[in-house]
Amino acid sequence: MQDQLDYLAKRASAGKLSRRDFMGKASALGVSAAAASTMFATAAKAASHKKGGDLKIGSTGGESTNSLDPATYASQVPYHNGRQFGDTLVEVSPNGEIEPRLATSVESTPDAKTWMFKLRQGVEFHNGKTMTGEDVMKTMERHSNEDSKSGALGVMKNIESMKVEGDTFSVTLKNANADLPYLMADYHLIVQPNGGMDDPAAGIGTGPYKVEVDEPGVRHMYSKFANYWGDDGHFDSVEILAINDATARTAALQSGQVHLINRLEPKIAGLLSRAPGVTVQSTPGRGHYVFIMHTNTAPFDSKELRLALKYAINREEMVEKILRGYGSVGNDMPINAAYPLFDSSIPQRTYDMEKAKEHYAKSGHDGSPIILRTADGAFPGAVEAAQLFQQSAAAAGIPLEIKREPNDGYWSEVWNKQPFCASYWGGRPVQDQMYSTAYLSSADWNDTKFNNPEFDAKLLAAKAELDLEKRKALYSEMGHIVRDEGGLICPMFNDFIDGVSDKLVGWETDPNGELMNGQVTRKLSFA
Amino acid sequence: MHPILKLVSQRLALGLLLLLAASALIFVGTQILPGDVAQSILGQSATPEALANLRRDLGLNEPALSRYFSWLGGAVQGDLGTALTNGQDIATSMGKRLGNTLFLAFWAAVVSVPLAIFLGLVAVRYKDRWPDKMISAVTLTSISIPEFLIGYVLMYFIGVKLGWAPSVAMINDSMTLGQKLQAIALPVTVLTLVVLAHMMRMTRAAILNVMQSAYIETAELKGLSSFQVIARHAFPNAIAPIVNVVMLNLAYLVVGVVVVEVVFVYPGMGQYLVDHVAKRDVPVVQACGLVFAAVYIGLNMIADIVSILANPRLRHPK
C-alpha cells in the first residue's frame, strides 16, 4: 500500500494529480480523509518549489583528512556530506517528532525493549542496487560491532540483537529505551549497501544527491540522483566548499560565491544582518558552552565549592558579551527549552555574590588560586568567557587562575583529563541521550565525573517509562540533581547562526542542527 | 670531472642526506606532539573502545622506530603510502595540491620577479630622488603589513565591494586557464606585495655596490646612457646576490604561503599540511616535509650554481 501511496504523492507533487483525484485514490487505499489531506498538502508544497539551480554552501570544519565514511564524521563538512548522499531510517522533525525516512513507521513492544522499523520498499542506492533489510542490518552492525570505530558507537552499545523479517527490521535492546527512534536518527547511521562493509568511504547511499567530486578539505560536488525515492531535494547540483576561515566565509556569501554559510561569528552576525542580499538566521539550539569540574577531584569534590563557583558566574553578561545576544542563559544543567519534556519551572540560577561568598566560606577552601583551563578552540570566545568568569568570581572573593592551553590537542590532553576546564556540548535530540552520554556514572564521556546513584536510578527508570507525564517528572528531578549536585557550570546555550542568500526560499527554524539540521539542500529552493 | 659537475653531484648527495635528516626530525616532532591520529580523528566523541579499535587498525601499536623505517622503505621506492585519516593515496592527493601551489607560486613569480628587478633598476637610476624614495616607501610598507591583513583588505574592497575578482580563490580541474587566473588574482597580488620589497631592495643594493667600481666610471666616460650602464655592465656583475634573494623568495612562494592559502581558501599544500599536522597523520606530514625540504634545497642549489656560472672567478677556482 505504501508504494502506491508514494506513487500517488509523487504524481501529485509533479502536478499530474488533482486534489480530488488524490483524495479519492488515497481513500480507496484505506487512508483516512484527514491523513490523505495532509499528504496532499505535503506533496503540493513540494510542487511549489522551483526545481533546478546549482547550490553552493560554504562550510567550516572541512579538512583534507575528511572521509566520506559515515562512521568517521566529527565535523561540519562531513556531516553535510552525509546529508547529501545518505539517509537514516528516521529523522527528527523541527518539532521534535520522529519523521519517516527509510523506515516508514516505527513501533515498539510495550516494554520499549524491542523496536520494529517497517522499511520503505523500492529505494535505490546510487550504484543501482535496491535497498534491502539486509543492508540496513549490516549498517547497524558496522556501527555497533566490536571492530567499530564509529562516532555512533556510544548510542549503539545498548543493542542486544537485530533481525530482519520481510520488510521489517527489528532491534532488541539490553535495557529498555523509550527514545530509541531518536538514537536511530543519528547522522552517522546512514544506510549503505551491505552496510558499507566493503567500501565504507565510497559515498554510496540513498540520498537525493550523488557524489560527483570528492576532494577532502576543498570541495564536495553532488548532482541530483534521478531515481531518488523522496520528493525533496530541488537543486540540480550541490557543492560544499570547505571555507574554514570565518572572514573568508562571510566574504564569499557577500560576494555571491556561495548561497549558504554556517557558523557565523556572533560579532560579525550583527553587522552582516545589515548587508544587502543576505539574511542572518539565528536558531536556538541545544548546544551549550560550559565550564566543567571533576566532582571526584579536590577541590571540586566539595559540593559547597561547586555551588560557590556556580553562583559566581554572571550568565547574562556572558550571553551579552560572548554570544552578542545570539543565545540564552543556561541553568547549570545540559537541558533547555529546546528539548521535549523540559520542565520550565526549575528556578533559574543567577549571579549572586553573597551566596557565592557563603558557599565558598563553607567549603573551607584554603584560598589558593583555582586553576581554570581554557583555549580558543574550547568554544568561540572561551578565553574571554574565562576572563569574565575570573572577574565575577574575584568580586565574590574566589581566586581563579586562567591557564591558557593550545587548541591543538585540547580535546585529547585537557578535556576529560584536567579537573576544571572550558568545553562545549552540541546537545542531543532528547534528554535521555544527553544525560546518558555525559552524566550517567558509567558513561564514557562523563566529563564531570558525576557519580550519583539516585540520578542513575532515575535515568534508567525514565528510559523504560512510556508515560510522558511520569517521564517528564523524572527528567525534572534529574535536572534538579545535576543543577545542584553536578560539576557542570553552564552559563549559556548558543544559537546556530547561519548566513542565507536572499535567492533561496523555504527556510524554517530547526533546533536539531545548523543549516536546518543539514536539510537545506532538501528543503530549500531558489526563488 | 668538470668542476661544475662535481659541485652539482656533491650538492645533490648532500641534499639527499639533508632530506633524510629532515624526515627523521619531522617524525620525531610528530611523535612529541600530544595525542595521536586515532584521538584526533575521533575528536571529542572518542570512546576508549573506538580508540582502541582505530589504533589497532592503523597499526599504531607498532613501535615508533619500526613505523619510521617501514615508511622510509616505502618512500625510497617511491611509495608514499596512504593517509591514515581517510585512506587516500598520498602521492595522488598531494600531487594535486602541489600542482596548485606551484601554479600559484609560478604566477606570483611571473608577476613579482620582473617587477621587482625592474623597480630595483629604476630605483638605482633615480637614486635618492623621488622615484627611488617612493618605490622604497611603498614596497617597504607592503612588506611590513601582515599578509593576512592585506588579504582581508583586498578581499573586502576588490572582492566584495567592487566585485572585480572572487574573494575566495578556489580552483578546480573543470576551470579554464582564464577562470583559474581570475580566481587567483587576489592571492597573487598579495604574494607579490609581500615578496616585492625584499627582491627590489637587494637588486638596488647589489647594483649600487657595483656602481662604485672603476669600470662603471669608464663606461660612463665612454658615453653610455645610464640605463645602458646599469643593464650591460652593472647588472651582470650584480646577478649573484640577486639570484640568491630571488630563489629564497621563490622558495617562500612554495613553502611559506600557508597564511595566504588559508585566507583565500586556496587548495594548496600549506592547508593540506596544516590539516594533517592537526590530525597527527604522520605519513602525510612526512611526505609534505620531504617535498618542502626538496624544494628549498633544490632552489638554493640552483642559486649557488647560477652565481658560480655568473662569476668567472668562481668558475675557475685556483
Image (tube, coloured by chain):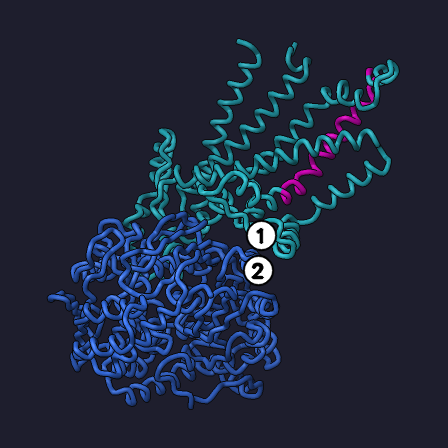
Chain colours: A blue, B cyan
Q: Amino acid at mark 1?
A: Ser
Quadrant where the N terminus of chain A is found in the figure: bottom left
Work out whether residue A347 or residue B139 is closer to the camera in this orientation and state it.
Answer: B139
Callout 1: residue from which chain? B
Dominant SS type (magenta): helix
Left or right of residue A396, residue B78 in this image? left
Identity of the residue drawn at 42% across and 88% down:
A344
- Is A147 rendered above or below residue A490? above
Query: Disc 1 on helix, strand or loop?
Result: loop
For mark 2, what is the residue? A254
Type of the residue with mark 2: Gln
Residue bounds of the magenta highlight: B189-215
Image mark for residue B167: 1
Picture residue at 41% right of the left edge, 41% below the top: B93
Q: Name the residue rendered at 21%, 74% in the picture.
A: A106
Q: Are marks 1 and 2 on the same chain?
A: no
Residue A192: quadrant of the picture: bottom left
Q: Depth check: give the residue in front, B30 or A167.
A: A167
10 Å crowding of disc 2: few (<14), some (14-19), many (20+): many
Image spot of residue B240 (x, y percent) = 68, 23
In-image side of A368 versus A132 (left or right)? right
Question: In the image shown, does B297 or A370 lie closer to the viewer?
Answer: B297
Tell me where residue A461 sits by quadrant: bottom left
Q: Tell whether position B196 is magenta.
A: yes
**In x, y percent, where is residue A9?**
26, 70
Give the class, few, some or many, for how many residues have Cα within 10 Å of label 1's Cα (few <14, many ≥20). Answer: many
Tally of numbered discs: 2
The answer to whether marks 1 and 2 mark residues whose Cβ atoms lie closer than 8 Å is yes
Residue B29 can be seen in this image: no
The residue sitting at the right extreme is: B221
Q: Chain of mark 2?
A: A
Q: CA distance from mark 1 to mark 2?
A: 9 Å
